[in-house]
Amino acid sequence: MKPPFGQRLRTLIGREHRAALFARWFPRRIDRILLAVIAVVIIAGTVLRVDVIGSNDRVSVDEGGYIANADRILEGQQIATFKWAPGTSLMFAAAAVLRGTPRISQATHSHGIAQYSQLVAEFLTLIMVAVIAWILAGPWAALIAVALMATYEPLIDVTRTYLSEPLGGLILIATVAAICWARKRDLHSLLLAGLVAGLAGLVREDYALAVAAIMLGLVLSGYPNRRAAVGRALVYGLVALAVVTPYVVYASIKEKRFTPIVSAGPHALFLGTYLPGGGNQFIDISVEAKTVCRHFRKTHPRYCHLTPGDAEGLFALIHSEHPSESDAAAAQTEAFENLNKYMLGEPIQFAHMLWNKAWNMWSYPWSGGNSQGGGGLTRQTSLFQHQLYSLIAWLGILFGLAVLRRRWAFVVPVVGLLAIALLNTFFAITPRDNVRFMPFVFLYGAVGLVATLRWSAERVRGRRSGAAPA
């Protein structure tokens, strides 16, 4: 006869049982020490993030877009703009509902719902980075990855904002974790991984390229056989597509043209492929400023006095050259013309431009988002720290690709990240675009670094044992 349920429950969660489970999961004393250190680092990183909340002295246009959409969601109305993916606004709205708040407060020096939902996203990312690094390469990799992420200034400063980077970093790690867990499991696990991938697309539209890379990786893995591998890849991709399709249909109907999650793609693609301006938004606008002013001097003189970075006049000029098309369609037409004229006509110069944009995006840190006294942005984050941390992480990834080249859970996610980064070089990118990738970079950099050191140590021990006398 079974003992009473209460007795079994006490046995399950009793002190001796907990101790046995803990000893099983962390058998070595050094593992238990490192676990405690990792926990301390996560707590310290969270405290640093709490400390910056309320220090924002500026709310950018992008932040205003996320807030406006969140407020419309809370009001049950059509979202205000389709320029940004809806995931972050949904997170803000969900946090407001849980807190019983009717609106998201848009303010400088804010301690609102949005900032604390950002804090939760960062905290969960720290935990996921630690867990995945531990699984892939052990406790030292987990400690290195968490230490890098916990103290990285842009990831600390972004907590005070209304931006999508915290949730973007979390959902990218979650997408990788879900598919690595589900890759050799049953169909239900694969469906769950596809669901997470679809949610990732609603947070950042360019994550769709990572999903494509994962599908290719599933096919090439040949598990459990080639035909089944193709089927599993299709199931994964179709579930992800099913998650984003309702929103794509909704956005396309409201925008009256096909809108793959966001509507700002054609404009960003034009700016990013305009070779005379270096593919950079601010240079593009300055290059065309005189032309815009000359064209609109009599009809729209305000276009002669736009602030740097305001592309309204430039795209008004493009639209005037294609009067029968919508604003987005005109930008898309000119973007394709850029690809035809510059990518195909001047491929070396175009490739050099893409390389310069990629280098600038990865080699400089995001400024922190706050403004100077005169209204311009000032760098509040350390260039030295960013470049040191990036060097450590990218060397780890590079060496890891060589040492772990047969490990699916390392190679395929890294290829997915590189695919997203390559796609981004065709658009108008800034150092802020690297912030959402840095948790992934720190995670896989630490894994690759520890795996390489372990491989090197084993090689040295092997040589010594081979040279020793019999």
Image (cartoon, grey):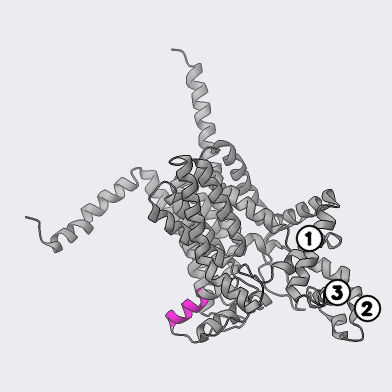
Q: Is residue 25 left or right of residue 111?
A: left
**Magenta stretch: dominant secondary structure:** helix
The furthest residue to the left:
1
Q: Pointer 1: what residue? A: 273
Q: Is residue 436 magenta?
A: no
Marked residue nearer the N-terminal end (1 or 3):
1
Q: Residues within 10 Å of mark 3 (few under 14, many from 20)?
A: few
Marked residue nearer the N-terminal end (2 or 3):
2
Residue 41 appears at what percent x and percent y? 48, 58
Q: Pointer 2: what residue? A: 294
Task: Inspect the image, locate mark 2, and give the three-letter code of the amino acid beneath it.
Answer: Arg
- Which residue sits at x=49%, y=18%? 466
In this view, 33 is above or below 280? above
Question: Over which residues does the magenta segment extend?
Answer: 91-99
Task: Inspect the image, locate mark 3, and give the three-letter code of the amino acid beneath it.
Answer: Glu
**Figure quadrant of the C terminus:** top left
- Which residue sits at x=73%, y=70%? 378
Distance in Å between CA atoms under marks 1 and 3: 18 Å
Q: Residues within 10 Å of mark 1 (few under 14, many from 20)?
A: many
Marked residue nearer the N-terminal end (2 or 1):
1
Distance in Å between CA atoms under marks 2 and 1: 24 Å
In this view, 178 is above or below 28? below
Q: Is residue 92 magenta?
A: yes
Q: Nearer the viewer, residue 29 or 443?
A: 443
Q: Circle 1 sits in a helix, a strand or a loop, which is it?
A: helix
Q: Pointer 3: what residue? A: 321
